[in-house]
Image (cartoon, rainbow, N blue to C red):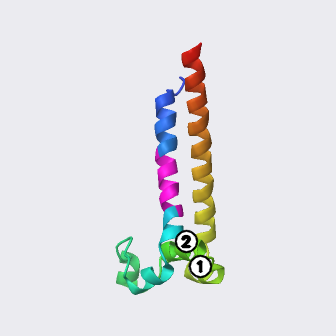
Amino acid sequence: MSPAVPRWFVRAYAALLGAGGALVVAVALLVSPDDLDTGRVALSPPCPIKASSGRDCPSCGLTRGVAALGHGQWSRALAYNRASPLVLATSLAIVAGAAFVLARAGREGCSSRRA
């Protein structure tokens, strides 16, 4: 039987995952794909694989694709990278799951203090 995971660890892990997912969702909503295309906003360094070989790597276009999804541009998002809807959906699921875990941990913590 494995030892129980401390509550503080579960809360910290959920908060960290939730923050990462929230960052992806924030990029989708706040950053325009046009800003990324023109270079007005740079969220990541240039891809070293594309710089050396001239070919896109599997993750090339994900940031622009997620930003396009956040602005309702589905066909443009799929043109940037076909995995962008999966990335955004996974990020939303992570945020929702982390919020659920943190809310549940908060309720359990409150009820155990009263008893």
Nearer-the-camera pick, 70 or 46? 70
Q: Secondary structure at mark 2?
A: helix
**Residue holding disc 2:** 66
The crowd level at tag 2 (other Cα within 10 Å; few <14, some 14-19, many 20+) is many
Q: Amino acid at mark 1?
A: Ala
Region of the chain picked out in magenta, as a range: 16-25
Residue drawn where x is 52% and y is 28% of the image = 5
Count all numbered tags in the image, as a single digit: 2
Q: For marks 2 and 1, give the CA distance.
A: 7 Å
Residue 115 is situated, as x and y percent measured from the top left of the image, at: 59, 12
Nearer-the-camera pick, 3 or 18? 18
User: Contact, CB < 8 Å: mark 2 with mark 1?
Assistant: yes
Residue 80 sits in which quadrant?
bottom right
Image-based side of 51 in relation to 113, left or right: left
**Residue holding disc 1:** 77
Residue drawn where x is 61% and y is 46% of the image = 97
Residue drawn where x is 60% and y is 26% of the image = 108
Quadrant where the N terminus is found in the figure: top right
The crowd level at tag 1 (other Cα within 10 Å; few <14, some 14-19, many 20+) is many
Residue 31 is situated, as x and y percent measured from the top left of the image, at: 47, 73
Tag of residue 93: none
Residue drawn where x is 48% and y is 54% of the image = 20
Residue projecting furthest to the top? 115
Residue 75 is situated, as x and y percent measured from the top left of the image, at: 65, 83
